[in-house]
Image (spheres, coloured by chain):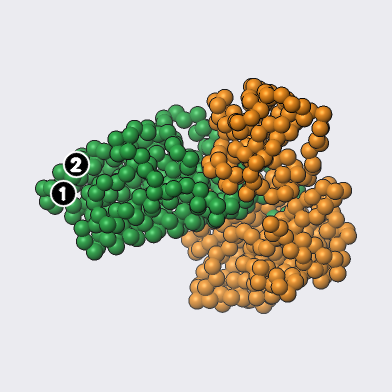
Chain colours: A green, B orange
Amino acid sequence: MSEGALAGAMDIEDYLAQGGVLTSPANVPARYRGELLRLMASFVDSELAASAGFAASINFAPGIKERIAASRITLEKADHAERVLAVMAEFGTDTARYQRQHDWAARVARDADLGAVRTGGDMRLSVFHYPIDGWADAVVMNVLMGLATGVQMTELTRLSYAPLAEVFRGIAPREARHAALGVEGLERLVADQAGRAAAVAAVAYWRPRVAATFGVAGSARHGMLARFGLRHATNAELLARWQAMVAETLGPAGLN
Amino acid sequence: MSRFHPLKVTEVRRETRDAVVVTLAPREEDRALFDFMQGQYLTFRRAFDGEELRRSYSICAGRHEGVLKVGIKRVEGGAFSTWANENLAPGDEIEAMPPMGKFFTPVDPAAEKHYLGFAGGSGITPVLSIIKTVLADEPASRFTLVYANRAVGTIMFREELEDLKNTYLGRFSVIHVLETEAQEIDLFTGRVDAAKMKALFAGWIDPKSVDTAFICGPEPMMLAIAASLREHGLSEGQIKFELFASGQPGRAKAKPVSKADLAAGDATTATVTLDGTTRSFAMPRQGQSILDAVIGNALDAPYSCKAGVCSTCRCKVIEGEVEMLTNHALEDYEVRAGYVLSCQSFPLTDKVVVTFDE
């Protein structure tokens, strides 16, 4: 790093539009900073809410193996929140206050309809406001959301703020493991009649709510995020990819 | 909460006509804070005519050297780099934040890796730190450096790089690419662009042998090199960037305060710029934050915690006065420059002009 611009240096927004990468809080433009922090806050809030929601599911677990899986997901999602919060700290975020800011375990009524709108004071994805009401519910939610996170990770691991992209590249395989644990749980769940019925009901409940996390098609903000290199694919493309993966995963379990 | 600590200048060595290498020593009690990773940078601050300036410079020492050294190249019109080149002397004190940055990979003494580095001009400083560190601490790894400069006279650390070649025979090689001077091999003249990268990979460097690539230089060079590395099969995780220069916060000029505008009244005209568009609207003087008023007027301003903690909603007051109730995120110098957390700010004047774009 050094001062000022050399001959041949270019406008930072042109650089980003051409796929350039930024490396420190000192070289991000103001609007980029705002969108980057918004993106990080949404991830941190979602992971903390997911962890808090899953904590209760540990006691729904029917056996030790399931209990360990749920504990691991609870632990690692909190750890992922902490890693991204550390990147926010470099922009000035007071991390000690931030993590105490909200009741991450708070949930709305099971039959509330939030759509894709953020509610409450935090930036968690709307899906993390709904309560989990049993083991089958926890497993299905984790499978559907795990696949959605996998799709989102294809975007997050290549975003243009290098220190954050690197954190996401560390997180991605562990999030993928959470989804895989879910799929294993789902296979055991549908092995009997009662489990299958519960899984069918849970898929009907969670499928539209997880789909809503991909946001609206034709989002006005997408153009700017794409120019900044903070997004590549559109919401509609990501949603379609998730739908295909869901069909592929639920098909063998007879849940489509 | 000052994150700055004094460093004592122990040596200033002229490296080229317009670059110096400055050796710095922390106070005994700050020693652990300034323990650095190869490739990290220091952020300095200094007041020029009453205005605070912050600049980041990469450390050019290897970890095992046990000293802090930064390379500072003078930039035309750059107040800080000119001062460092012309006035800085042993015995001076300068304030710096502890080392930051992630332009490195973990060192593993058992590793047998091939690192590829690209440096443009003074972009060599962090790359040199990495080269020295991995050559010393990973005895089975090797490093290939492609180093772009305008002319021989402007090459920083030329002798030091030659010495490294001799010390680590067979493990370190340098390809100098000079923009304005013809060399024996045509390939080594001109700029490092897509065509040159292709030629380098065709005859000089086997892309399949590369574990990690480091790039530090001006933006167009970074773009060309990164694109070529991807084309030749390197994944995002294998390419490490350090953006050199540009976009750093400029002078923290204090905003002029006009007390005359601090009149009593119950409404304010707010003018807000976001994404290049400016809109004016009326808002109450009490009970509604600037952020809520902006969102209420269908402007999609960024925010998150709404509690003065995260700083996502930061904006800059251009005209008028606001009162910021809580601030856990902005530093004093940002506040002096006019930045506020819009979620915590309420208008005090008849007219308030803010921007989210600066």
Quadrant of the rendered image containing residue A178: bottom left
Query: Toward which corner of the image does residue A212 lie, by quadrant?
Result: top left
Q: Amino acid at mark 1?
A: Gly
Please tell me whether residue A155 is drawn above or below residue B346 in the rendered image. Answer: below
Residue carrying label 1: A195
Image spot of residue B196 (x, y percent): 61, 51
Question: How would you rate the neighbour count of disc 2 (Cα within 10 Å): few for under 14, some for 14-19, many for 20 or more?
Answer: some
- Name the image quarter holding the C terminus of chain A: top left
Residue A64 at least partly seen: yes
Secondary structure type for disc 2? helix
Residue at 39 percent of width and 49 percent of height: A105
Pick the front one: B188 or B24: B24
Label 2 is placed on what type of residue?
A: Val
In this image, A37 relative to A216: left or right?
Answer: right
Gap in Å between the C-alphas at discs 1 and 2? 9 Å
Q: Position of residue B197 (x, y in %)?
A: 59, 52
- Residue receiving disc 2: A200
Which percent across, then down, holds residue B318?
Answer: 74, 33
Q: Chain of mark 2?
A: A
Q: Is residue B149 visible?
A: no
The quadrant of the picture occupied by the N terminus of chain A is bottom right
The residue at the point 55 percent across, 34 percent down is A224
**Chain for mark 1?**
A
Pointer 1: residues within 10 angstroms few (<14), some, or many (20+)?
some
> Is B11 left or right of A110, judged from the image as shown?
right
